[in-house]
Image (cartoon, grey):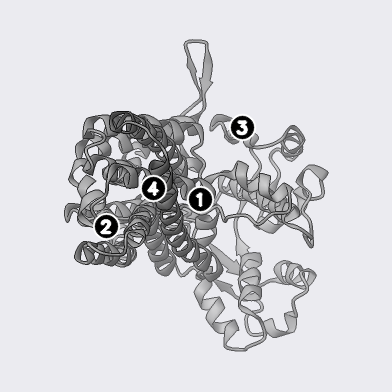
Amino acid sequence: MIFFYLLSGLFLGWSLGANATGNVFGAAIATRMIRFRTAALIVSIFIFLGAVLEGSGPVGTLGRLGSVDALGGAFTVALAAALSIYVIVRMGIPVSTSQTVVGAIIGWNFFTGKVMDYQSLITVFGSWIFAFILAALIAFVLFFIFRSMLNRSKIHLLEQDFLTRNALVIVGAFAAFSLGANNIANVVGVFVPVTPFKPLNVGGLFILEPVTQLYIIGAISVVVGVYTYSHRLVYTVGKDIFQLSPITALAVLLAQAIVLFLFASRGLHNFLLARGLPTFPLVSISFTHLTVGAVMGIALAKGGKNVNYHVLGRISISWIAAPVMACLLSFVLLFVMQNVFELKVHEGLKYVFNRRTLAEIDRNGYDINALATVNGRTFDREQIIFNELSSQGSYERDELIDIIRITQVYPMEVDTKLLTAKGLHKSFSRDQWKCLQDLEERKFRHKWQLKATLIQNEAWHLYESPANEQQKNHNRGIQSKLELLYRSFYKPKEKEHR
């Protein structure tokens, strides 16, 4: 049955592939510097490598925006995003996979009554806008740099053509690799905790971990999308918005690759942190946004004339229509799946205000006297608690969200064999793993109980008041591992499976 659930993720991967060649090599194909078959081959190879070798992607922010907690829900959310993308791709318009997935997750939040993390939403939207502007700016500057280099050089036209073609291939390969690393988690990331695969011994040479197998399948679906449908979109960005020359096509592609790398590379992020320099948020960036932004940068550098604003308007509308469509479709499909097909789309968690949770709320420095109206009560939706307590005006929004998280009932049992079977044990250091093994078969009723137990060990230390970006980054890393443990160790009672 698990393989049936994976189909929606593979459909989403196909949709990503349908956009890929046009986004990466659309400008180069439109200027006849690279044939479609060559471009499709390069994109397929390097998206596959990026997905398999660096497939984790910057999905932490999306996870905070809304973490789908049931396999049926993951299937439905991915299906809603894929269908939305397919409808717009059928119109011949490139569409953002990242945006559409965000819209589908927001639909899941509304359906399940989850409280929206608006700070994460602002981070995502702000990063998209900034990335668009940055791509336009870099392409604008590269245009003048390349033009100056050509004017000063005495390279023969044929040699210039040869160098440009090779540069397009190299930069395109890098862009495709970054795209695979950055976006594949949008395709199959929600299925990682429930992957059905076992470690696979490949001819006695190496072990293929279950998560890697999942990314390989997702990457294959992207490649299928590249070869079966992407040829319909290659001219929309590379020719229909603004007519590009081979050199300006190279500037567009290089601008795309640079910006995507800035928002996708954890190595660069840590490098900048270590030197006290500003960092770029690790957010999944829309490659379609970067493409259009870079093309507009070139158009402005050439005086802003000959821009096809009709096509640009259609693409811009899709950036709004796709997430809105995915949000609405996600909500409707979740309702249908749950009520018509009786599919479990979310865990249906409980939230209790009792002596234990009130004591923890008090330890976190919150005034529990304002909780008199909810004391002793059990809730099944976050939004109900949020609405009731926010009307009293005793807590800030972030405080309310923290209080709700404390009251959440989330039964878990430590089982390191589950992590090993899925190949997730490599995510932890030796000391962290030893600490987990010492807790084998321990049961916890709330997430904060497992967290409180682990952070007593130095390997799981958290800075209470991080003083710099390095300490903040350390805390984010620990929190990411804790979230992995929560999902892996979750063990609901039999009555919660109904």
What's the CA distance linking mark 1 and mark 3?
21 Å
What's the CA distance linking mark 2 and mark 3?
38 Å
Q: Which residue position holds label 2?
A: 84
Residue 417 is labelled as 3
What's the CA distance linking mark 4 and mark 1?
68 Å
Q: Is residue 391 visible?
A: yes
Name the front one of labels 1 and 2.
2
Relative side of 141 to 104, left or right: right
In the image, what residue type sits under mark 4? Arg
- Percent x, y of residue 496: 49, 55
In which quadrant of the rendered view does residue 433 lie? top right
What's the CA distance linking mark 1 and mark 2?
35 Å
In the image, what residue type sits under mark 1? Glu
In the image, what residue type sits under mark 3? Lys
- Which comes before the other along the chain, label 1 or label 2? 2
Q: Given contact means CB atoms under 8 Å apart, are the residues at marks 2 and 4 in contact?
A: no
Q: Residue at x 73, y 53 (%)?
A: 276
Q: Secondary structure at mark 3?
A: helix
- Percent x, y of residue 382: 53, 71
Q: Secondary structure at mark 2?
A: helix
Residue 494 is labelled as 1
Name the front one of labels 1 and 3.
3
| Placement of 222 over or under 133, stated as above or below | above
For the N terminus, the image quarter is top left
Relative side of 362 to 486, left or right: right
- Which comes before the other along the chain, label 2 or label 4? 2
Name the front one of labels 4 and 1.
4
Q: Residue at x 35, y 62 (%)?
A: 300
Q: Residue at x 49, y 66 (%)?
A: 126
Q: Which residue position holds label 4?
A: 147
